[in-house]
Amino acid sequence: MEKISVAVRVRPPIKQEVQKANQWTVGEKSIALYSAINPAVPVHSYVFDHVFGSQVKNADLYKIHIKEVIMSAVRGFNSTVFAYGQTSSGKTYTMQGSALDPGIIHLAIQDVFSTIYSTASREFLIRVSYLEIYNEEINDLLAPENRKLRMHENLERGIYVAGLREEIVSSPEQVLEFLAFGESHRHFGETNMNLYSSRSHTIFRMVIESRDKVNNSDASSDAVRVSTLNMVDLAGSERISKTGSGGVRLKEGTHINKSLMTLGTVINKLSEGAGRHGGHIPFRDSKLTRILQPALGGNAKTAIICTITPDEIHLDESRGTLQFANRANKVTTCAQVNEILTDAALLKRQKTEIEELRQKLQGSQSGDLEQEVLKLRNDLLKFELDKERLALELEEEKKAQVERERRIKEQEQRIENLSTMVVSSAWDDRERAKPAKKNNRRETWCPHQLSSGFASETNTS
Ligand SMILES: Nc1ncnc2c1ncn2[C@@H]1O[C@H](COP(=O)(O)OP(=O)(O)OP(=O)(O)O)[C@@H](O)[C@H]1O
């Protein structure tokens, strides 16, 4: 068991913000709010794994707080890094960075590949995907036509997004190209608080498979390590009164706030130990928490960067973020290296085809060979993903067919019920239309008159 590692970062003030009486003071692992009235005693103070002031560059934050988690992913541990905080507090800056100050995702990509290149004893296979959760719908940022994707869960793959495009990559440059492509399709929008505000949560994912290159007969040497590295840039919580959102922005803001609220509840419950004691944790209440479920409550190493703004007018939001950070710091996960002996690893499934191709291309230029192998790997992966998508579509179609049949039966039953009602109401109508049934018994009203009449009749005959 290990704790989720949490750092807080205070971004530098931006033009329109003015420093006022209350100031956040940053130590190496602590952050406190002091007021001008009593500068000796902090109004609030918190301690975290790391705290970064406004002068700290992304590269330093990465080295101190993130690098270890990224290296764990290369060693076979599922790992997740995410940035959390109010809108305009610097999450995207932290994850993506700028040309002069590259962000965590860029630094991680470089680090993953330089580690792989220097690990001669293992063979690696890396694939990437990029998705966004926009208005509670999952869209594929590497294949923008893939929208409203569904989540599934099975024993082999755990929780996964069906139909999500994955690309096998062999260099950092290739990954950065895919990242840039995905970025250009992600939802941004202007609000009063941020000219370029993320309107969706995004998850950039690298699946890292590796196996020992040494070939011996020992079955365990055939094991493939498979780990998932998630790098998440959350949309920021926002107060509609401050962002001035209306129309589309308001709808987006409502979805963002709702999913972040669920994330807050999940963290809250986990920090109280609900996971260990079998209590209910509402992972399924939002797509975000469902996707992050393994990172928050399972087999993963997780690092969070909580970003705050230095401005006094956002004091309440900053305190909210620090409270979230405080609770997240109490959450524990249980990470272990994922070694797989079955065909669940792509490296294993592709082994025969790749070996055949290698044999065929022996003797050709080694650069060409690697390009051919990469192309074949991607073709095989696409074929598999298409097969999976078709299988899911077929399954959905079957379910829809069962549902259609159920509805038809229901309709038939209704019609049958109606027709018996019609029959019975027609029966009632006929019954009502019939003349009153004659009574078999003679009416014997005024019996003495009748008997006297009868008597006279008798007498006249
Ligand atoms: N550490 C930093 N150094 C310099 N500028 C920063 C830093 N952090 C953030 N900024 C700047 O602050 C502004 C807001 O940052 P950013 O867009 O990253 O916020 P955000 O939290 O991702 O917002 P949203 O949730 O609305 O997407 C941007 O102009 C960004 O360049």
Image (tube, rainbow, N blue to C red):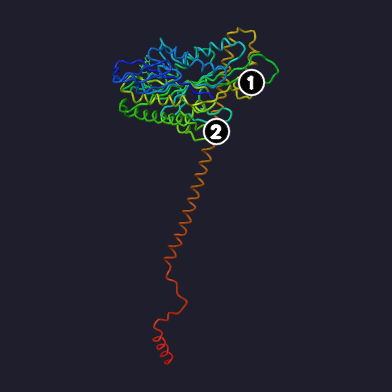
Q: Position of residue 370 (x, y in %)?
A: 58, 11
Q: Amino acid at mark 2?
A: Leu
Secondary structure of the residue carrying tag 2 is helix
Disc 2: CA contacts within 10 A as few (<14), some (14-19) or many (>=20): few
Quarter occupied by residue 304: top left
Q: Earlier in the sequence, mark 2 or mark 1?
A: 1
Residue 337: x and y, percent? 58, 21
Q: Cβ of disc 1 within 8 Å of ligand 1?
A: no
Q: Residue furthest right?
A: 217
Relative depth, front residue between 392 and 189 = 189
Q: Find disc 1 in the rendering and name its residue.
A: 223
Image point (51%, 41%), residue name? 403
Q: Amino acid at mark 1?
A: Ala
The quadrant of the image that shows the C terminus is bottom left
Q: Quadrant of residue 122?
A: top right
What residue do we see at 44% from left, 27% from top? Answer: 327
Which labelled disc corresponds to residue 103?
none
* Residue 247 visible somewhere in the drawing: yes
Residue visible at 58% across and 8% down? Answer: 367
The picture places residue 31, in percent across and down from the top left corner, at 39, 19
* Mark 2 touches mark 1? (CB < 8 Å): no
Mark 1 element type:
loop
Q: Nearer the viewer, residue 182 or 45?
A: 45
- In the depicted view, which residue is nearer to us: 32 or 381? 32
Residue named by callout 2 = 394
